[in-house]
Image (cartoon, rainbow, N blue to C red):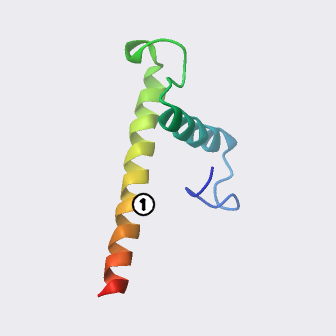
Amino acid sequence: MPFFCCRNIVHDRKLQKDIERYIYSEQFGISPYPGSYGEQPAKWVDRAFIIKSALAKKQKDQIDATRKDNN
């Protein structure tokens, strides 16, 4: 869980593991669970989209803050 949240705030270990699993699977281009996309657990697919959206929002906020600081 490199940058997504503070360990003191997120106490749900399962959520932390989901974030780690998402980042690992994205970085190495592997499925988080055995099988193809259609064989992934539905709950995982939902969680993955939520995590992806949250990471994209965080990145956008960081870019916007950097642009604001540079102006």
Residue that protrudes farthest toward the left in the picture: 71
Residue 38 rendering spot, x and y as whole percentages: 38, 14
Q: Quadrant of residue 36?
A: top left
Question: Which residue is rendered at x = 42% and y = 52% of the image?
Answer: 54
63 lies above or below 36 = below
Question: Which residue is rendered at x = 38% and y = 76% of the image?
Answer: 66
Residue 19 rendering spot, x and y as whole percentages: 56, 42
Question: Which residue is more in the foreground, 15 or 58?
Answer: 58
Residue tagged 1: 58
42 lies above or below 53 = above
Q: Quadrant of the C terminus?
A: bottom left
Question: Which residue is rendered at x = 48% and y = 11% of the image?
Answer: 35
Q: Report the label total.
A: 1
Residue 70 rendering spot, x and y as whole percentages: 34, 85
Question: Which residue is rendered at x = 64% and y = 61% of the image?
Answer: 6
Residue 3 rendering spot, x and y as whole percentages: 58, 58
Q: Quadrant of residue 52?
A: top left
Question: Which residue is more in the foreground, 20 or 29?
Answer: 29
Q: In this view, does 7 lie to the left or right of 34?
A: right
Residue that protrudes farthest toward the bottom in the picture: 71
Amino acid carrying mark 1 in the image: Lys
Q: What element carries label 1?
A: helix
9 lies above or below 35 = below
47 lies above or below 58 = above
Are there few (<14), some (14-19), or many (20+) residues within 10 Å of tag 1? some
Q: In this view, does 67 lie to the left or right of 41?
A: left
